[in-house]
Image: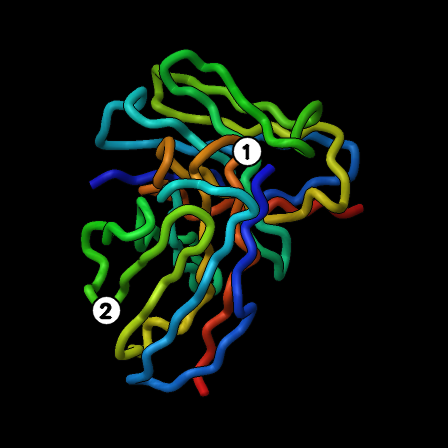
Amino acid sequence: QVELVQSGSELKKPGASVKVSCKTSDYTFTSYAMNWVRQAPGQGLEWMGWINTNTGYPTYAQGFTGRFVFSLDTSVTTAYLQISSLKAEDSAVYYCASGYDKFDYWGQGTLVTVSS
Amino acid sequence: AIQMTQSPSSLSASVGDRVTITCRASQGIRNDLGWYQQKPGKAPKLLIYAASSLYVGVPSRFSGSGSGTDFSLTITSLQPEDFATYYCLQDYNFPRTFGQGTKLEIK
């Protein structure tokens, strides 16, 4: 059974950075693309981009360039989302989701709250 | 970017009802569309992929149809556990884009 387990909730101050992890299990890590999806409070789903787990090459959606970085550590089958210079509007639940076309498996979500 | 427009944005129905949610793409996307169900506080789950293929383990009361620009998700004989928010997602090209969601509530 494939499982994506994300790191726990984070409370950060404006201007700080956060790194969310997404650990996969029970399948070949490089077999799937890894996507990141944001959900602001009470809002819908927003695709942030994806990272090619074979090459490590990231692709970012418009609006998620500059402060957002996707990365991998294949040795521990984990994907990461790092957000720098946090703003209040970055407060959201962030999901990792595996799959190039259909998003078969999802992490449980990580709540990031940005507040002074 | 391809715009995905879902309708309705919310829907009230009763257990046992049949409901249909639609999704329209701003340009043709072949059959490159999936449907996802999300319950409060939970991650989305894949229901349908390639517009009409039922994902493993998903009850057969869920079905999808459409191609090109117009798609629909139909749930026959609604069950209590089906009350949730549903999203379409196009995987025709990048950036991937979701519909705005349809909240299905109990009447």
Circle 2 packing at 10 Å, graded few (<14), some (14-19), many (20+), is: few
Instruction: Tell which subunit mark 1 falls on.
Output: B
| Kind of residue at badge 2 | Arg
- State the SS at label 2: loop
Residue B79 placement (x, y as % from top left): 29, 77
Q: Is residue A37 left or right of residue B54?
A: right
Which residue is at the far top?
A55
Q: B86 above or below A107?
A: below
Q: Is residue A101 left or right of residue B27?
A: left
Q: Residue at x 33, y 50 (%)?
A: B51
Q: Identify the residue under disc 1.
A: B95
Q: B77 above or below A78?
A: below
| Kind of residue at badge 1 | Pro
Q: Tell which of B60 and A21 is nearer to you.
A: B60
Any mark on residue B61, and which?
A: 2
What distance separates the C-alpha of mark 2 from that of mark 1?
Answer: 30 Å
- Asked where in the image residue A99 lies, by quadrant, the reply is top left
Residue B100 placement (x, y as % from top left): 57, 57
- Asked where in the image residue A38 lies, by quadrant, the reply is top right
Q: Is residue B8 left or right of residue B58?
A: right
Instruction: Tell which subunit mark 2 falls on.
Output: B
- State the SS at label 1: loop
Residue B47 placement (x, y as % from top left): 31, 55
